[in-house]
Image (tube, helix red, strand yellow):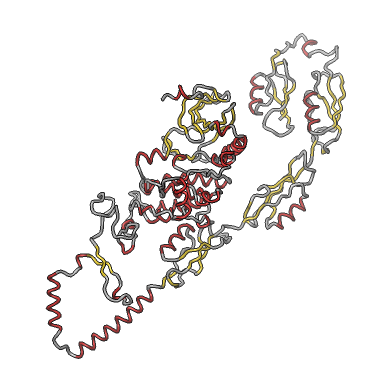
Amino acid sequence: MDTTLTDPLIGQLLDGRYRVESRIARGGMASVYLALDVRLERTVAVKVMHRSLAEDPQFVRRFIGEAKSVAGLSHPNIVQVFDQGTDGAHVYLSMEYVPGRTLRDVLHERERLPARESLEMVIPVLAALGSAHQAGLIHRDVKPENVLLADDGRVKVVDFGLARAIEATNQTKTGMMIGTIGYMSPEQVTTGQADARSDVYAAGILLFELLTGRQPYEGESPMSIAYRHVHDHVPAPSSIAPDVPPSLDALVAAATDRDPARRPADANAMLIAAVETHRGIPRTGHTAQHRTHHTGGHPASPTGSPSGPFGSPGSQPGVFQAPPPLVYVKDGAEDDPAGQTMIQPLSELPTEKSRSAGASARTRRRSPRPIWFIAGLALVMVAGIAFSGWWFSQSRVVKVPDLVGQNIVLARQAALNAGFEVKVGQARFDDKMEKDNVLDTEPGPGAEVDKGSVLTLIPSAGPETVPVPDVANLSEAEARTKISDAGLKVGRVSKNQSDTVPRGQVIGTNPAAGKRVKKGGGVNLVISLGLLMPDVSQMMRDQAEKFLRDKGFNVQVDETDNSAPHGTVIAQDPVGGTPVMAGDSVRLTVSRGPDEGWHWPWENNDSEAPPDFVVVPDVRFRALKDAQRELRAAGFKVKTRKLVGTRRVIEENPRGRQPMGATITVWH
């Protein structure tokens, strides 16, 4: 169906700025349109919320706040938000237009991706999420539909904060869960709460789907899928796609742990693990360990059988090759080590010929043996029993591996693979060990413990940090004491003029108050010079008087005859630059203009030709450099005066028609 006939927005000018060209997509919460920003003449994507949301004032208020937060994100893997607004019943976002397709489109086309390529899709997604997590923003709805693959290969994440805005609506007050059920973390299902670790969980599900071509859980209803997120462990991707390497199984397992405390702390922590995993995967996407990481060096299906759907005869060539047929043999008493289950190739089973040979041998063994043979046999039996006892006792003892310095996610999986029960202890500050790497283990590396023992990993919290104290409006001495008490030291001290902070008191700090810095680090102070009288001489009276009154001064004006143009301030008391207090009086002397006997210089000198009069360009509110350039191009001299210290012109004088070559004063 032609959307131009059914969608009334197409062809309209939204908010007087965005000309809607066509509809790109329509979802459960919004429609996305291709539009032209007629003000900046650029193509944008405009997401217009459905009317049911736009009519909810709580949603609109939260939506605007979230849009402002997302607009502050600047990252190459995040779709940039340019603008937000409302136009009648339409609430919209103006965003960067990314020509391409979604990751869902890629999965529909290719079903699943190789291990290395899957990571190369997920790594930029984690980088985008990590940038948002550092800024305190949570996505809440990570899924293939919200990952865009641009035509030039860039990966972009879209719809940050939209789910949080939806939570503010009346539509959620009946217990509706926000998010996409296939990617929701257990805590989102049970409590409705989400943090950075919930995004990590969804990223783990996304990676699982890229590797296997399907989501980990299927069910007849959304609630049955939600139940499995809460109560089941996400299966290893290799249980569905056997060519997935163990390192990716470990990464997915860590990201999708049902306990948020055992997941990577945020997307940046998972990003580090993903990049390290990517380094270990050859460009072919296969490693020798893909085929030998199961028990006994033979590939195993998820149920533990020696072959599965990918390992059975007739499976696709080049994907998985089944080992030689195996049989299980059990012989002897259960408490006899020799009677334990063994795995043995069919080629080693006894044949009819070997049975006949064995019978002949038993007949020969009925003949008497010399005593030395019996004694030797007894000695061998004693040695075998002793060796068996030693062997089975040693097999229950393992050494603690050296995991210090490894990323906590990978170290945890390595310890699990080694047969330990793993706990992650309280992180400790350390100036040398990078954050989220293993600082120590309990027991320590090399210790011999029983297999299955608890191994506690102590992560590094990085260097200890403390918040910068708020020392605004304190004296310099008081500020120094407070900063020292916080475990920091004072760095550079600079001074600046202030209209509000008295002379000698602290205006602020760098880093700002509340910002966490390394303990023992330096904090720069900015001390107030107090209020200095602004220099408004040569300014027009109305502008000078308004400026001074806005600053809190009591302005008095005297007028006098002067050659300066009418209304020009020719003097002030106190003069500019004098230290003053807010509320002080200032007297301005203003010109009434030249008296009747005043003439232009050339009117009394016939030899001097009158200059050309030209209109002075109005450069107020222009950038200072641009204003100077324009005035000089018009034939005037330029004098600059600092008033508030901006880089834009706030006033100029004289204005109107002036002789070519006259001096124009601009204030900034």
Closer-to-camera residue (436/90) = 90
Classify residue 211 as left or right of residue 434: left
Q: Is residue 206 above or below residue 551?
A: below
Closer-to-camera residue (389/245) = 389
Classify residue 198 as left or right of residue 533: left
Closer-to-camera residue (557/260) = 260
Q: Is residue 501 above or below residue 280?
A: above
Image location (x, y in percent) of residue 258:
48, 55
In the picture, the quarter occupied by the N terminus is: top left
Image location (x, y in percent) of residue 93:
55, 32
Task: Name the residue located 12 percent from the left edge and 81 percent from the top edge.
Answer: 363
Closer-to-camera residue (6/31) = 6
Total marks drawn? Answer: 0
Classify residue 603 as left or right of residue 304: right
Image location (x, y in percent) of residue 420:
44, 66
Image location (x, y in percent) of residue 441:
50, 66
